[in-house]
Image (spheres, helix red, strand yellow):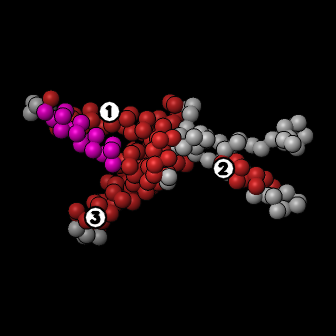
Amino acid sequence: MTTGAANSLNAGAGDPGGSEAAKAVVPRPTECEDPGPLLRIVKRQEIAFAAVGVVNTALGMGLTVMWLAVLGASVPPAVAVVLAYAISIVIAFVLHRTLVFRVRGHMIRDFLRFVGVNSGGLLMNMVLLSLAVSVLHLPSKPSAVVVMGLVAIASYFGHRYISFRREPVPPPSAGSGAEQF
């Protein structure tokens, strides 16, 4: 049984009536018992998420520079960005899936949701930065840093509750013969 399921089941231990709210299993985004190598080191999923984000950002920058060099001046620079993004989003997905959220199964569904959350982050970044600079007349560079921080936080929750969400495993019913002695 996962930690989340154990916590949910224990929530009703002091409730002799066993209310429905106490019996509900809270959805957990992970299904692996083993925290994995990164979470053994950093202990917190949020820090692991940030660490993978830093690695992926550096990878994206490196890939963009590499593609700019490989493609040369005859190809628009945007092509280098698209190629770098196409590679780095797959790597980010694998790293977040295996090192941060530790889920299994539903690979294609998870990837499509991951791309959707990342696309939402890009849109959020564009809108908030435009509002900060054009409407509020704030300086662009500090605004960009603040907006990127907000987008990173929103992305964490998006990936936790959308990209890598797992349905709860219901507790065994009282008459199912699954009681443990």
From the top left corner, tell me how far across and down residue 93 is, in percent. Answer: 43, 37
Residue projecting furthest to the left: 73
User: If the image is split into quadrants, where does the N terminus sit?
Assistant: top right
The magenta region covers 54-69
Determine whether label 3 and label 2 are within 8 Å by CB.
no
Query: Residue under circle 3?
Result: 143
Camera sees residue 113: no
As helix, strand or loop, the secondary structure at mark 2 comes to: helix
Q: Is residue 58 magenta?
A: yes
Quick one: 180 or 24, which is closer to the camera?
180
Cα distance, mark 3 to mark 1? 28 Å
As helix, strand or loop, the secondary structure at mark 1 comes to: helix
Query: Which residue: 39% across, 45% down?
Result: 52
Residue 87 numbered tag: 1
Q: Is residue 66 above or below residue 156?
A: above
Q: Amino acid at mark 2?
A: Gly
Q: Is residue 70 above or below residue 21?
A: above
Q: Earlier in the sequence, mark 3 or mark 1?
A: 1
Quick one: 159 or 181, which is closer to the camera?
181
Residue 4 numbered tag: 2
Comparing labels 1 and 2, the label whose residue is closer to the camera:
2
Residue projecting furthest to the right: 175
Cα distance, mark 3 to mark 2? 38 Å
Which image quadrant for residue 168?
Answer: top right
Query: Which residue: 82% across, 62% down?
Result: 14
- Dot 2: within a 10 Å radius of its alpha carbon, few (fewer than 14), some, or many (20 or more) residues? some
From the top left corner, tell me how far across and down residue 67 is, in percent. Answer: 19, 33
Query: Which residue: 36% across, 59% down?
Result: 149
From the top left corner, tell me how far across and down residue 40 is, in percent. Answer: 50, 47
